[in-house]
Image (cartoon, helix red, strand yellow):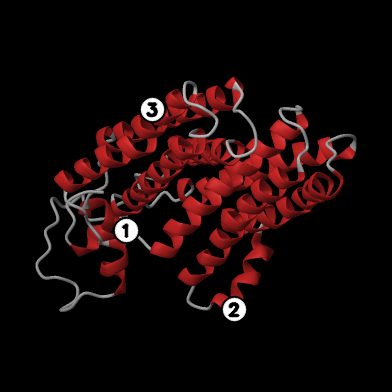
Amino acid sequence: MHPAYSVIFFTTASGAGYGLLVWLAMASALGGFPPDWALGLIGLGLALALVTGGLLSSTAHLGRPERAWRAFSQWRSSWLSREGVLAVATYIPAAILGISWVFYEKFDGPVIIASLLVSVLALTTVYATGMIYASLPTIRAWNQPLTVAVYLTLAMATGGILFVFVLSFFAPLPTWAIALPLVAIIGAYFTKRFYWEAIDEAPRTLRPENATGLGHIGKVHHLEPPHAQANYVMREMGFKVARNHADKLRRLSAYLMFLVPIVCLLLLLMVSTFTAPLFALVAVLAMGIGVVIERWLFFAEAEHVVMLYYGADAA
C-alpha cells in the first residue's frame, strides 16, 4: 500500500495523544500527584492538541474533506465512523477533567468518573482505529488480531513517554511514573515483534487462480499487463518496499521506539531533577521518529489482493 503521510501523522499523533490522556486521567483518578493547574494545562493541552491535529490531518486523505462529517452516520457498520463518534465523545469528559484540574485544582467526586470515562473512551477510540485496518480481509498483513494490539500498546508506550516528559518539569519523578511507562514500552516491543513475525510467516494462500476463478483449469499466467501506464490502483495498492530495506527500517524503528526510550527511562532513575527533562526529551524524540518509521512500514509492507490482477504471484 502507498503510505499516505496524512494518515501516518494521524495514527501516530492521535495515538500518542490518546495514550497521554489515559496516563493523565488514570494518574489523576488514583491520586498519583497533586492537582497542579499548570501540569493539567500543559499535559491535557498537549494531549488534546495531538489528538485534534491528528484527527484534522486525517481529512487531508479524503477526496472531499468537506464531506467528512457524513462518516459519523455509519457507526452501525463502519469502524471509521465508530472511531469518529468515539473521538468526539472523548472531548466531553476530557473537558470536565480539564476544567476541574486547571481552574479548581480538584480531582474528587464526579471528576474521578470523568477521568475513568476519558481513559475508557480514549482506549476505545484507539481500538476502533486499529479495527479500521484489522477488519479488511483484502490485506493479509492487517487482517489479524495483533494489528489492534499494536495500535493499543504503541499508544500507551508513546503516551507514557510523553507523560514522563511532562511530569519531569514539575516534580521529582516518582518511581511508579518511570516503571509503568517502562512496562508499557516492553509490552509494545513484544507485541510489535510478534506482529512482524506473524506477517512474515503467514502463508500467502491467494493466487491468480483464486482471483480469476480459473484454478480448476490450471495455473493462470498474465499474457499482457492490464494497463499500458500505471493507474490509481497500481499506485495506491501496488506500492512495494524491498525486503532488505524493510528489514533495515524495522531494526532502526525498534532501536528508536524501544531501546533508546528504555535506556533513557532507566537513566531517569539515577539522574538529578534538573537533568531529567533532557533525558525525557531524548526519549520522546527517539520514540516519535521510531513510531513514524514503524507506521510507514505498516502501510508500505501491506499487500492488497487486487494486485493479483496486476501480475502479483500471491497475496
Rendering quarter of residue 73: bottom right
Left or right, 233 with respect to 69, comes to: left
Q: Quadrant of the N terminus?
A: bottom left
* Looking at the image, residue 180 lies above or below residue 218: above
Rendering quarter of residue 76: bottom right
Neighbours of disc 1 within 10 Å: few (<14), some (14-19), many (20+) = many
Q: Which residue is mark 2?
A: 66
- For label 2, the SS is helix
Q: Nearer the viewer, residue 204 or 232?
A: 232
Q: CA distance from mark 2 to mark 3?
A: 45 Å
**Residue in the image at 20% along x and 64% along y:** 310
Left or right, 262 with respect to 246, comes to: right
Q: Residue 278, percent across and down?
A: 46, 39
**Residue in the image at 72% along x and 45% along y:** 40
Q: CA distance from mark 3 to mark 1?
A: 34 Å
Mark 1 or 2, nearer chain start: 1
Q: Residue 174, percent across and down?
A: 61, 23
> Is residue 76 visible to us here?
no
Neighbours of disc 2 within 10 Å: few (<14), some (14-19), many (20+) = few
Q: Which mark is residue 263?
A: 3
Q: Which mark is residue 1?
A: 1
Mark 3 or 1, nearer chain start: 1
Q: Residue 191, percent across and down?
A: 42, 30
**Residue in the image at 53% along x and 34% along y:** 274
User: Amino acid type of disc 2?
Assistant: Glu
User: Amino acid type of disc 3?
Assistant: Val
Q: Nearer the viewer, residue 219 or 75?
A: 75
Q: CA distance from mark 1 to mark 2?
A: 25 Å
Q: Nearer the viewer, residue 273 or 187?
A: 273
